[in-house]
Each structure stands twice: as C-alpha cells, then as structure tokens.
Image: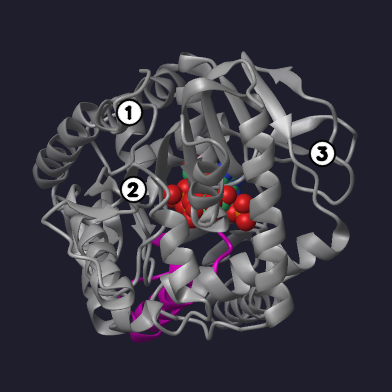
Amino acid sequence: MSGGYKFVVVANRLAVDAAEDGGWKRSPGGLVTAVHPIVRRLGGAWVGWTGGPGEAPEPFEFDGMRLHPVGLSEDEVDRYYEGQSNATVWPLFHDAVEQPVHHREWREAYETVNRRFADATAAVAAEGATVWVHDYQLMLVPGMLREQRPDLRIGFFLHIPFPPVELFMQLPRRADILRGLLGADLVGFQRPLAAQNFLQLSRILLGLEPKEESVEFGGRTVVARAFPISIDVDEIEREAADPEVQAQARHLRQELGDRRLLLGVDRLDYTKGIEQRLKAYRELLAEGTVSNDDVVLVQVATPSRMRVQQYQDLRERVEREVGRINGEFGEVGRAPVHYLFQSRSRAELVAMYLAADVMVVTPLRDGMNLVAKEYVAARVDDDGTMVLSEFTGAAAELDASFLVNPHDVEDLKRGLCAALAATPEDRSTRMRAMRATVKDHTVDRWAREFLDALGGAS
Ligand code: ADP
Ligand code: G6P
C-alpha cells in the first residue's frame, strides 16, 4: 500500500500537543523547535503522537502542516514513552547521568509502538517518497519500514548523543536497535564522534566492516555522518526586533531593579545540570563573591515527563535547593532565585534572552542545546554573555562563550564570575563571533544538507 506524500517526517511527537482546553499547544523540546519550520516550508506529512493516551484523532491541518496522529494506549504511554524511551534509552544515551531502568514489558511496548509508526508511515508515503525519521523513541522504525517499503529513501536523525560503545552494550536487545537504525540510507548525528561510535558498534556487534563514513548492510550502503542541528534564526531575530518584545525586556529589567540577571531556560531534566548551576550560585553567594543586591538568577523550567520517577525526584531536589537559597540569602521583596516551573511563549523567552546579562547553559550532557543558539540569535544588540557546558553539542560551535565543566563546581563558579566580569568590548567581540556562526548555520541549512545527502526532496 502506498499513500500520496512525497515527503514524510516521522517523530514521536507532532508539532502540537493536545491542550487541556481541547485545543492545541506547541509541543515541548528542541526536536519540534527545529523540525517545525522545515515541515512548514517543505510541506508533506508529519506522522506522530498528540501527547496523550487514547485513539488517534483524524489527520488534520495545522499551521500549513498535514499532521497524521498515531494513537497510544495508556499502557503504551507508560511503557513505551515514559518507560523504554525516557527511563531506559534517554538516561543511557546521556552518559547514564541517571541510572537507566530495564524492563522486558517496556521493550515489548517499544517494539509494538515502533511497528505502529512504521505502518502509519507506509500508509501515507507515496511510491519512492523521502521519509525522515527522528530520534531515540523510534530507532526500530527505519528497519521496519524498509521491510515493507523498499522503494522509500529513508533518513534517520538522532537529536540526542549516541553513547560510546561500552555504554550502548548495556542495552538489552542492542543488536535489534542497531539493525533498526541500519534500515535507513542515511543516519545523522549531532557530532562526528557519535557517527564514529555508531560505525564502530556496527563492527563490534554485527561484524560489519565500516569505512570512514559508511557501512555496507543488507546489500546497501548506509551513510553515517554529523549534521549539527540549529534554529530558525530569522524567526528569533524578528521577535527580538519587535518593539513589544523589547518593551517586555525593559519591563523585566525594571522589575529586577539594578541587579544583573543570570538566566536559565530548560526543560526540567536531570541532563540539564540545573542542580549544579544552583549549587555554584549558592556557593558564590555564601562566599560573598556575588551579592543578592547585585545579582539575581531567573530559572525557567518547563515541566517535562512528570510521571517518570526520576523527573519527580529532580523536581523535589531543585525546589528544595531554590527554597534553601532564597531562605538563606533572600530579603523581603528581593529573592536571589526566581524559579518558574512553567512553559513560556516564544516572545516571552526572547524578551528574557534580551534582558539577560549572563545566559547559563550547564548540561551534564546534551546532543546540541538549542536554547544556547536561541539566546545568541536573540542578541541583536551584540551584548550579553553565556556560560556554556563543554558537554553540549553547541559548545563546538559557540566557543566564544565561557566554556565550563559542570561536573566541577569550582569551574562553574569561575565561568560565572568571568562572564559577570566581562567588559563591554569583550562581550561584544564574543557575541559577534557567536552570532556570525549561528546566522551561518541555520536550521534550513541543516535540513538542506541532510536531505541533499539523503538524495531526496528539498
Ligand atoms: P531539549 O530538546 O532537550 O528540550 P533544547 O535546548 O535543544 O533542549 O531545546 C529546548 C527548546 O524548548 C527550545 O526551543 C526552548 O526555547 C524551548 N523551551 C525550553 N524551556 C522552555 C520554557 N520554559 N518555555 C517554553 N519553551 C521552552
Ligand atoms: C528532546 C528530545 C525530543 C523530545 C523533547 C521533549 O528534545 O530529543 O525527542 O520530543 O526533548 O521531550 P518530550 O518527552 O516531552 O517529547
């Protein structure tokens, strides 16, 4: 069976999430931020889940995109999404900064749901279509799809890190996952090292003979390369130039008095190093290196995966630490940390980026980190500094930031102090260098390079 679309994007999440009021809201996370403008521009269909349990709604149009929902039962949300995807694969692929949990029923649900995504994709893809599968929730889909539809060009992009061989080897049924990925014609990663890990694994696990950027599998050549992802720079620049957004940024600064603003914007995830950031800030306050009269930290943390135990535990720890810092160093009407456990609109985020003196991005491990790129794109004034973890994909491109090792609290403190102390000339030199990089590597370019390499539509 084949459908009518020449270009199909497949991702666990659709661009929109079912909202409580029965409408739709933008889905969280970097994947949607990056892929949304591409599908809007290229057209085609997007196969994905609406973010809640139950039957799939009928396909619908949204913001110029044709969305094809895949339904998940409550049990599948529990086992495939919260379990195998986010309590097994997510921590394992992020250096096991939290202990991965393994359950047979989760793996079975992962396979069942991946099969459903493959079937739904096979049903909408036209003869010879280009299909682009995304991320760690769907690693079996390329192989399953190829079995049904050998006529398709299949690309896969992993938005998160690909682990070193010895970590991947911990994954039960690891060879099935690898074979699933090898069903693609092109497997894209954020960093060259990830592509190397993948190729090396094909040798160790399956006895294949990888070359520098490819490997032969099942009579086909599978190419594995890095394609560092990016953002829609024009969209952010437009927001930053909007007088209302600029007024919002000024208002925020007035609200905070004459204190300098340290800003964190993340999903509330243990990979983001939020606890490490808070600890460093508390120590700086305790030592008197920074003072509550002079500096304030605003941390915006989007609720994420809140039914997963590790995320509930993280929330408790973060909120306890925020309370502790505010209790120890605050005054009436003047808290050292403003913690917002909320999702904010794009315009509000850009206003915050514009208002910040120091953007604090400290993941313990992150495939790319689009927040870092959004901040740079928003700084049309060439001002503002950034403390950035070496363990993000973004660090390779944004090395004019203040790079830190977030596992080392002293190094984090050093980075924060250096960023706060930077002179206006230094700030502007660094920001100009980072802006040139981000403006040159847009998400459009990322998609074009990937699709050109896949040899499909663009
Ligand atoms: P991840 O994909 O792990 O969430 P990224 O930094 O790559 O991390 O992407 C996060 C995306 O989610 C960015 O586009 C960012 O603007 C958005 N985002 C993060 N925190 C919030 C928030 N509190 N409110 C709204 N959007 C957010
Ligand atoms: C990261 C992942 C995405 C995921 C997003 C939000 O960006 O790479 O695949 O969609 O986080 O997480 P969620 O579990 O809410 O989809």
Asked where in the image residue 82 lies, by quadrant, the reply is bottom right
Image depth: mark 1 or mark 3 in front: 1
Point out the stretch of residues depicted in magenta: 267-295
Examine the structure image and report whether residue 271 is included in the region drawn in magenta: yes
What is the C-alpha distance between the residues marked 2 and 1? 11 Å
Q: Are marks 2 and 1 in contact (CB under 8 Å)?
A: no
Q: Residue furthest front?
A: 219
Helix, strand or loop under label 2: strand
Asked where in the image residue 22 lies, by quadrant, the reply is top right
Q: Are marks 1 and 3 in contact (CB under 8 Å)?
A: no
Query: How far across and down, in percent of the image, does residue 215 sit?
Result: 22, 55
Image depth: mark 3 or mark 2 in front: 2
Quarter of the image that includes the C terminus: top left
Q: Amino acid at mark 1?
A: Leu
Residue to which mark 2 is pinned: 187
Is ligand 2 less than 8 Å from the beta carbon at label 2?
A: no
Residue at 26% x, 77% y: name it: 204
How many circles with numbers are drawn on the protein?
3
Residue at 56% x, 50% y: name it: 144
Closer to the camera, 147 or 134? 147
Query: How far across and down, in percent of the image, does residue 292 sit?
Result: 45, 68
Q: Is residue 37 above or below residue 210?
A: above
Helix, strand or loop under label 3: loop
Q: Is residue 198 above or below residue 431?
A: below
Q: Which mark is residue 100?
A: none
Left or right, 400 with respect to 145, comes to left
Residue to which mark 3 is pinned: 19
Q: Amino acid at mark 3?
A: Ala
Q: Is residue 409 above or below residue 304?
A: below
